[in-house]
């Protein structure tokens, strides 16, 4: 890397950095991305998994953000089938005032208009009960249904990074930036350190982009960055059979009236989210607290009383820290803006804030700032299709159409390679998930897996989908993946111990939930 004359060095392997890398490389820049941990390790694998326009932003009068969000949602639905999928949301009405109901429906009409849609939203009590049969029926007047979308956030990052590599970009995980390099006050590159070998090199770049999200203020050698208010969003994961849902169910929490949701995702049901100040620092992984756990369980018991849900039904938890701009008003966390901010100094452009949904718009805005520092580069920054490579694997071996679409969405140009790599029985789904065993093999072979946690928490999501982090399947996972990874028995045993210890401390249902 040190021998290359890079146009752009992107720091941060989450969705923001990945989007910038893709949009830069497809417009001719020679670009490198480095991530100090694993791709999508931070916020971008711990989100609510929703690709949405943000009804709340519309209610707050943020029309520009809502319009941008719904348009980006529609682009992702169009360009990434099998990875970004439509998701209906149902909101039960237990006696809201007629005025409030009309206001909600009017907002949904605007929401649809911005997206170029037109749907019917109101259902009477009988129709709503058929749509969401597990909600409480006592006092049910009817309900409202609207459409948004969902995704596998970590796989979205990996797909964007691979699309960038198809345009000539290069990426490295487990490579940290120790400090920025400067010449006559201008940033001209960075000192990099490989976390695996310990080796360090200097890399030169015409422009460096700080896309580290919630960690944006910690880059050594940069000038003053923005004020951030790290906010934690926590989630519970419940087996799909225990909380079966066809629609996402939105509800107002019985304690404080905040919106909470539960929706079907990858064979399980996700419940979220909290929105609290994260005071634990950013050096380690975020985790759900006992208070947050109990808060989300209270919402479930109120909305689904007949199911008798308890903490014992939770199979896993996870928490992420959002890079939210600090208004300085010290108000409720949910009132802080979700818009992004771009700032710059000579040779350096920084970006933080924003949403998963709008990563392409954030990338293009960032590149407009980059272009001001590269006089020779005059790019057309009009949005292009999110993914140009939409190869679909052939229907060999009587593969179901849904699996073909899944592989095409998650793996793009490599979808056929995943099919070809599969051995007998490996195109079958791992019980309790929608993930075929073949995705494990391909990830171990070709997706820069350096830790077992990379494989089970980000390349696949088995660590949050299965009881005990998938411990019951580790023998078969080892048989498939250890030869592909080239790990010795000593290495695998150590990785397995580390992974299970991490799962118990940060992803387990109860063990780590100290008050």
Image (tube, rainbow, N blue to C red):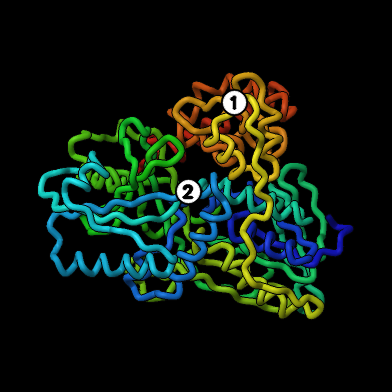
User: In which image quadrant can residue 280 be found?
Assistant: bottom left
The numbered mark, 2 or 1, whose residue comes first in the sequence reads 2
Q: Residue at point 59% right, 74% down? A: 342
What residue would you read off at disc 2? 85
- Indicate the position of residue 343 as horizontal and vertical percent values: 61, 76
Q: For the residues labelled 2 and 1, say whether their Cβ atoms are less than 8 Å apart.
A: no
Find residue 23 and report its image quarter.
bottom right
Position of residue 53 measured from the top left corner of the image (x, y, whole percent): 42, 63
Which circle marks residue 398 in the picture? 1
Q: Is residue 172 above or below residue 366?
A: above
Q: Residue at left 33%, top 45%?
A: 247
Q: Is residue 378 left or right of residue 211?
A: right
User: Which of 68 and 395 lies nearest the eye of the viewer?
Assistant: 395
Image quarter (top left, top right, bottom left or bottom right) of the N terminus: bottom right
Q: Nearer the viewer, residue 57 or 42?
A: 57
* Residue sitting at x 57%, y 68%: 361
Q: Residues within 10 Å of mark 2 (few under 14, many from 20)?
A: some
Q: Position of residue 195 (x, y in %)?
A: 71, 46
285, 84: nearer the viewer: 84
- Left or right, 201 with reference to 506: right
């Amino acid at each position: 890397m040190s021998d290359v004359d890079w146009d752009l060095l992107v720091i941060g392997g989450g969705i923001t950095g990945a989007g910038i890398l893709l949009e830069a490389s497809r417009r001719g820049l020679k670009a490198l991305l480095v991530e100090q941990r694993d791709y999508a390790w931070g916020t971008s694998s711990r989100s609510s998994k929703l690709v949405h326009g943000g009804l709340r932003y519309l209610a707050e009068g943020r029309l520009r953000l809502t319009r941008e969000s719904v348009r980006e949602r529609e682009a992702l639905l169009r360009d990434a089938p099998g990875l970004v999928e439509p998701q209906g949301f149902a909101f039960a009405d237990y006696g809201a005032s007629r005025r409030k109901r009309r206001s909600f429906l009017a907002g949904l009409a605007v929401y649809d208009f911005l997206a170029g849609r037109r749907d019917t939203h109101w259902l009477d009590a009988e129709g709503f009960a058929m749509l969401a049969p597990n909600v409480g029926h006592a006092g049910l007047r009817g309900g409202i249904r609207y459409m948004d979308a969902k995704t596998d956030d970590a796989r979205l990052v990996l797909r964007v990074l691979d699309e960038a590599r198809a345009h000539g970009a290069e990426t490295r995980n487990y490579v940290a930036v120790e400090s920025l390099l400067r010449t006559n006050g201008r940033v001209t590159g960075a000192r990099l350190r490989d976390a695996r070998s310990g080796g360090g090199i200097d890399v030169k770049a015409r422009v460096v982009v700080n896309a580290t999200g919630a960690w944006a203020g910690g880059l050594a050698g940069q000038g003053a960055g923005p004020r951030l208010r790290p906010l934690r969003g926590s989630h519970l994961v419940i087996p799909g059979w225990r909380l079966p849902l066809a629609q996402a169910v939105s509800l107002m929490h019985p304690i404080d009236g905040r919106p909470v949701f539960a929706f079907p995702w990858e064979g399980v049901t996700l419940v979220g989210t909290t929105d609290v100040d994260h005071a634990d620092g950013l050096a380690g992984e975020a985790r759900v607290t006992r208070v947050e756990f109990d808060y989300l369980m209270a919402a479930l018991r109120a909305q689904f009383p007949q199911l008798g849900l308890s903490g014992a039904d939770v199979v896993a938890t996870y928490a992420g820290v959002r890079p939210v701009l600090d208004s300085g008003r010290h108000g409720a966390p949910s009132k802080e803006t979700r818009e992004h901010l771009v700032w710059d100094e000579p040779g350096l452009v920084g970006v933080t804030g924003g949403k998963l949904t709008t990563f392409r718009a954030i990338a293009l805005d960032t590149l407009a700032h980059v272009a001001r520092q590269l006089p020779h580069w005059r790019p057309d920054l009009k949005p292009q299709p999110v993914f140009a490579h939409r190869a679909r694997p052939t229907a060999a071996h009587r593969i179901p159409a849904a699996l073909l679409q899944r592989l095409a969405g998650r793996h793009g140009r490599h979808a056929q390679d995943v099919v070809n790599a599969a051995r007998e029985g490996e195109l079958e789904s791992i019980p309790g998930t929608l993930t075929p065993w073949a995705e494990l093999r391909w990830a171990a072979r070709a997706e820069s897996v350096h830790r077992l946690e990379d494989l089970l928490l980000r390349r696949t999501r088995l660590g949050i989908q299965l009881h005990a982090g998938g411990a019951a399947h580790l023998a078969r996972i080892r048989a498939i993946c250890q030869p592909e990874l080239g790990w010795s028995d000593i290495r695998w045993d150590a990785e397995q111990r580390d992974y299970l210890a991490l799962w118990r401390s940060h992803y387990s249902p109860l063990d780590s939930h100290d008050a």
